[in-house]
Amino acid sequence: MLVVMKNHATPEEVEAVNEKIRTLGLSPHPIPGAQRVAIGITGNKGPLDPGLFEGMPGVAEAIRVSQPFKLVSREVKEEDTVLDIGGVKLGGRTVIVMAGPCSVESREQILEAAHAVKAAGATFLRGGAFKPRTSPYEFQGLAEEGLKLLALAREQTGLKVITEVMDVETLPMVAEHADVLQIGARNMQNFSLLKQLGNVRKPVLLKRGPSATLREWLMAAEYILARGNYEVALCERGIRTFETMTRNTLDLNAVPVLKALTHLPVLVDPSHGIGLRAHVAAMARAGVAAGADGLLVEVHPRPEKALSDGQQSLTPPEFEGLMRQVRVIAGAVGREI
Amino acid sequence: MLVVMKNHATPEEVEAVNEKIRTLGLSPHPIPGAQRVAIGITGNKGPLDPGLFEGMPGVAEAIRVSQPFKLVSREVKEEDTVLDIGGVKLGGRTVIVMAGPCSVESREQILEAAHAVKAAGATFLRGGAFKPRTSPYEFQGLAEEGLKLLALAREQTGLKVITEVMDVETLPMVAEHADVLQIGARNMQNFSLLKQLGNVRKPVLLKRGPSATLREWLMAAEYILARGNYEVALCERGIRTFETMTRNTLDLNAVPVLKALTHLPVLVDPSHGIGLRAHVAAMARAGVAAGADGLLVEVHPRPEKALSDGQQSLTPPEFEGLMRQVRVIAGAVGREI
Amino acid sequence: MLVVMKNHATPEEVEAVNEKIRTLGLSPHPIPGAQRVAIGITGNKGPLDPGLFEGMPGVAEAIRVSQPFKLVSREVKEEDTVLDIGGVKLGGRTVIVMAGPCSVESREQILEAAHAVKAAGATFLRGGAFKPRTSPYEFQGLAEEGLKLLALAREQTGLKVITEVMDVETLPMVAEHADVLQIGARNMQNFSLLKQLGNVRKPVLLKRGPSATLREWLMAAEYILARGNYEVALCERGIRTFETMTRNTLDLNAVPVLKALTHLPVLVDPSHGIGLRAHVAAMARAGVAAGADGLLVEVHPRPEKALSDGQQSLTPPEFEGLMRQVRVIAGAVGREI
Amino acid sequence: MLVVMKNHATPEEVEAVNEKIRTLGLSPHPIPGAQRVAIGITGNKGPLDPGLFEGMPGVAEAIRVSQPFKLVSREVKEEDTVLDIGGVKLGGRTVIVMAGPCSVESREQILEAAHAVKAAGATFLRGGAFKPRTSPYEFQGLAEEGLKLLALAREQTGLKVITEVMDVETLPMVAEHADVLQIGARNMQNFSLLKQLGNVRKPVLLKRGPSATLREWLMAAEYILARGNYEVALCERGIRTFETMTRNTLDLNAVPVLKALTHLPVLVDPSHGIGLRAHVAAMARAGVAAGADGLLVEVHPRPEKALSDGQQSLTPPEFEGLMRQVRVIAGAVGREI
């Protein structure tokens, strides 16, 4: 249930609705809008009667929400959410490109990568300081040193920084250095972490789990919004199927379906999605054509020497080529890069 | 192994190679090319020694083929196969759009659909006369009457006709009326049917099975080529995954991967792929952006009354909108519609 | 809808119900039972009103069938179907074991295999004369010669013969030699073939397609029953998942779920299911423990020389060991082998 | 590489090998055995030369390990690991049954459940105090209160307690009350948590992620062993496939494959695996027949009132019936319950 307040509803009228909701044993979630406030209700098992609220002063209407996800739903908030990340708008007309190496490996590597992706038109630098690896014997990231190198690259280039946070322990450290906190696919349903992200005042990029349904993914985002952090974007990065020629199966069907279901920005990671350098550009083009609000692309100065994901990382010249291609596609769908 | 003959190799020299192959207990597959003949060898268990052929008169070189599929492979034929279907080129610079209803339902319906998709720019009319349906109690198609209605629509509009063939019994009847024979997803590994298609002189559009790997799909196409029919195109139509919000998961990763592995044209069916009318256009745009050589789109004059697949069929105005969008995307990737 | 007639309903009363169904534009399917006739109704889109039939002479009751599959459903026929195959009962208390090589390769091979599996306690000989193979360059079976060798092995051992039929063309030939017609996984939704099987008077073993849902599988069986052949058994043989260590993922969940939904016998093929010789016996034990009515096991006198599926075929001594193990399990679930 | 020391190798000889490994830039992992020490080596990219170690004093042999998982591998430790959990042996001849409700809901509920499963023959009480739920609006568990109730139930019944730990923050609290720490499917690749579990002196039950390959699962276990906690057991609980009639697809193929690859105990959770009360017993039987070392079964005094997973929870009488059935199966495979 969503209670939509009139344009000039007073704070007292809003609070009266909140109080009514609480007396029903439910939780109110006031969602501030440009013109008027709406109040999401959670905690109910079955549908509520709109009549409970529609007579109250300041209430415009009470709408039933048909999906199990509420705060992330377009039913609750019709207009697109546009995140303002230090002046860069994510979710608006401009398609945002985030690029950089899988892992931060050294000062030289990250700075070289940062300058290269900046020159080609990226607005965000990506790079992992904490790396979730299938094997305990693989490179696990430079940790705090990596975060500092990312901050240095930001200073030199003006790029925003997105990097992965793996646990609650290192969340404050990562939040100190990053502009956007990335939640990796394997942690999409790490609910303890999601709850903490709800308390943080940093935008979050939530990657889809390799076998998460769209519904589960939206529910995971709901965990963050339900705790009060409304700055969330979603990133499709390939699902697990029976196909073995590609690393994952980038599910572009998710893009238009999500754009219809949720007001949150939707990005695409073609690098993890297909996992083959030669085909990253084709999937990036397709992602933008399908309506993605942004791209996450792996770029490494020397992919053949990368400590992780070299087989899917582009060289700087390849990335430049990709940018040229997706710019044309963005124009063809009425957007820009 | 592929034995590539010199440009001016004589028929006798070609035959000598064929004979040599036969004496090794293997099968020769001469593949005529624009300038010179190549001879594929099948039947060997392990790699063959190029020296067996490289000394022979007229032989330019002998190349090891690393994939289990051979005749469909780019290793064997580097340049794109362009099918000439009564003057319409499939696999060339122009992206071909095939559109029409799921099933031929009546004279009025198919003619109305044909004129509408023709007006919007399609060059092929699609429509099923024999319908594979999950339930024996569902509409199974108009059979021969449907084929005649398709032929009538072709006569009136000049569109080419593509329709599904379900079995060997009705193959001659379908081949008589269709310009392209479509093999549905459920028959992708109906090997008895594939073998017969190898003997037919009609182009074949082979749809991907819902859980077929790219390798299995290429091997299924190989069945047709191995019997002598080289006019084959492939069509991605969605794979089966765990996701339930979409009918299937259109796997656009298949497009660039296949274009690298095979010389055959690759089409995309966004209608079956995502199965939701509202999102067909987005997936069509993405398909063309990924490099597809054509689209297969379901269009019905009155989708709400369709006997099958109404929920994914576009109305004629929606299809017109889709055509406008994909034309721009085609231009953005250096092609046209 | 199922109209259940009273025990002593007359043929005229039954025919009156049939006629009533036809005048509604629907199809009656009289299902003869031990004591009384039931008439399935198909062709209706929504639920029918039981009152249409419950007043008619001879009618005991009219029951709504909630599933899209009808004739195969336990709602329509509560007691287990027990197939009588030349005196061998499939679907009763005895767990039936069908064993033999993947392909019939030679007279010596099939006779040796037949004697071995007979000695170990199998009652059916399995072996393919027509082989669906992923590659056109692989061994495709001995065709009619293979069928004759199977018949010879039956003559020598008294084993019943089960073998695969791949198409309508060879159906009469296969039906002449086989006791049970096997439909392979790739042909589960070859509807043209299924329809013909409905007209045949031979039991059919319908294997599950590698990505078929249980519902689709039951609908495929429904195709056969709807045409009049009620002698159908189902065989789980592994589904396609993301796992690559096993050939397929034998889905034993299917066994109890199917036994609840349908009255047809349910078998398990552990050989294709897991695809690894060392683990076939464990999966055979688990299949019987889960409630399977029979097993299909690949046995080859010399697996290392098999023309197909050698890696999953048991040697005769290994098969003997498997039989000993499953006999104990059968006893533990109140059955016998 | 695994360096196996002679029976009477001295500590100095062992240390010399460790030192040699470190000078190669690799990590030694001494694995104490009943009679002799073996030293696993990790950190190498390619195969090592056995000659590096085989001449050294005290070294019996140096063995190449072919899998990416090492410490969990049977190549490294041939005999079964048997965990001794306060006197209860997990991984030995006795099949261990862990049973109880999905969530601890109240004092009455958990005590009633505990006495019931104890009476039926379970040796462990399961019950969640911290619950990972798809929706933030669902019951999240009683937290510390739940842990105390579990401890109380242990006191009253003598059952061991297994309960889920969701994060590093609550790990000490859970470890204080639990006998075995359960890692849920969604946290299988929560590497930060796995690393901490490596430092804990409590047995861990690691559930398989819903789309984890067997290799990834073993690598996740390797994370725990690599940090020094060798007391790990694995639990198959159903994978995600395309099938929708069952909640998950319990993958019993995993049981024999894992038993061959690893020395760790392997359990099966039929409740989550199939997710349908009526079929839990069949899958439990099949799991034991396949070779499982234990079962995890959901039992609730009043499933229809359960706050979570009621549809798959057994009533106490149903659980008693299940125990009778699996006891017979255990006997049939040479084990007991």
Image (cartoon, coloured by chain):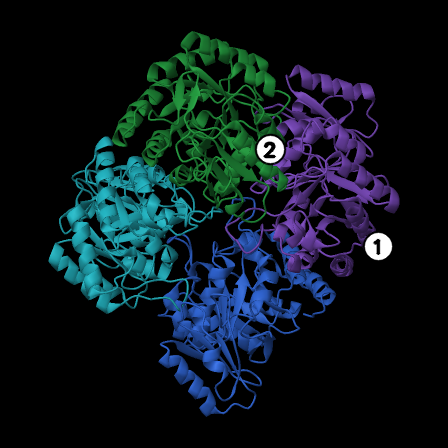
Chain colours: A purple, B blue, C cyan, D green
Crowd band around label 2 with a 10 angstrom C-alpha radius: few (<14), some (14–19), many (20+): many
Q: Is residue A155 above or below residue B103?
A: above
Marker disc for residue D23 = none
Image coords of residue C139 (percent x, y): 34, 66
Q: CA distance from mark 1 to mark 2?
A: 36 Å
Camera-nearest residue between B44 and A328:
B44
Instruction: Give the chain of mark 2.
Output: D
Image coords of residue B199 (percent x, y): 41, 77
Is residue D225 visible to the viewer in this orientation of the structure?
Answer: no
Q: Is residue B198 above or below residue C221?
A: below
**In the image, what residue occupies the spot 36% across and 38% down?**
C257
Classify mark 1: helix, strand or loop: helix
Q: Amino acid at mark 2?
A: Asn
In the rendered structure, the answer to whether residue C24 lies left or right of residue C113 reads: right
In the rendered structure, the answer to whether residue A270 lies left or right of residue D71 reads: right
Camera-nearest residue between B56 and A337:
B56
Q: Amino acid at mark 1?
A: Ala
Instruction: Give the chain of mark 1.
Output: A
**In the image, what residue occupies the spot 55% across and 42% down?**
A211
Is residue B115 visible to the viewer in this orientation of the structure?
Answer: yes
Total marks shown come to 2
Position of the N terminus of chain A by quadrant: top right
Image coords of residue A234 (percent x, y): 69, 41
Are the residues under marks 1 and 2 on the same chain? no
Q: Which residue is mark 2?
A: D190
**In the image, what residue occupies the spot 27% across and 49% down?**
C296
In the rendered structure, the answer to whether residue D158 lies left or right of residue B310 reads: left
Classify mark 2: helix, strand or loop: loop
Camera-nearest residue between A71 and D177:
D177
Marker disc for residue A119 = 1
Farthest-out residue, top: D156
Name the quadrant containing residue A70: top right
